[in-house]
Image (cartoon, rainbow, N blue to C red):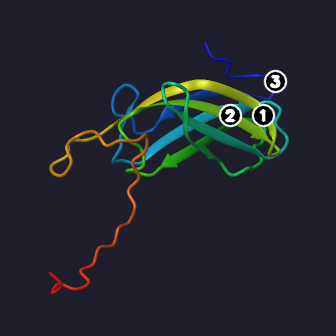
Amino acid sequence: DKETSNAYLAITDIEMLNAEGDGGFLINKELSLKITGINRGLKKPVNINLFFNSEDGTNIFTTCSTPQYFGPGEFEVRCDIPANFMNDNSYYLDLMVVENGHDIKLHVRDIMVIEGIEPPREAGWMGKFPGFIKPHFNWHINTINEHAV
């Protein structure tokens, strides 16, 4: 069992708000992660860090909340990851709570494992897309000179 509490805070739950089955999420939909806890003694601005790692522990990416003061008692934090950013992989999440920009108050490794699920594709490349993330960027394609053939 992972140590998710100490004298400063307790993490009481971490969940996917839009889960598809047991620990899975559709990669073409926004992924929302909700963290709930209890502030027992944090007195300065706090930021929550989520580390998304591969199965072998390699960090794929990290996201951090904006530092802000949490009053004493229960709190809730939500992280929204846009649709079409993740790939169909398993992600092992670490959670870190940092106070005052540098003071690590809690670090829980492998607090949650989630798995990206790709919905069926109708055309184009039908194999697995390589990489741990699969962001969709805006592409602009224009014909410059149609008579140059």
Q: CA distance from mark 1 to mark 3?
A: 13 Å
Q: Which residue is the site of mark 2?
A: 96
Residue 7's disc is 3
Quadrant holding the C terminus: bottom left
Which residue is nearer to you in this view: 86 or 141? 141
The residue shown at (45%, 38%) is 17
Give above or below for 29 relative to 112.
below
- Element under disc 1: strand
Amino acid type indicated by mark 1: Ile
Q: Is residue 119 left or right of residue 56?
A: left
**Along the polypeptide, which appears first: circle 2 or circle 1?**
2
Which residue is nearer to you in this view: 142 or 149? 149
Amino acid type indicated by mark 3: Ala
Question: Badge 1 local density, few (<14 within 10 Å), some, or many (20+)?
Answer: few
Question: Badge 3 local density, few (<14 within 10 Å), some, or many (20+)?
Answer: few
Q: Is residue 33 left or right of residue 65?
A: left
Residue 136 in the image, given as x and y percentages of width and height: 38, 56
Residue 98 in the image, given as x and y percentages of width and height: 75, 39
Q: Which residue is the site of mark 1?
A: 104
For the residues bearing labels 2 and 1, Cβ distance under 8 angstroms: yes
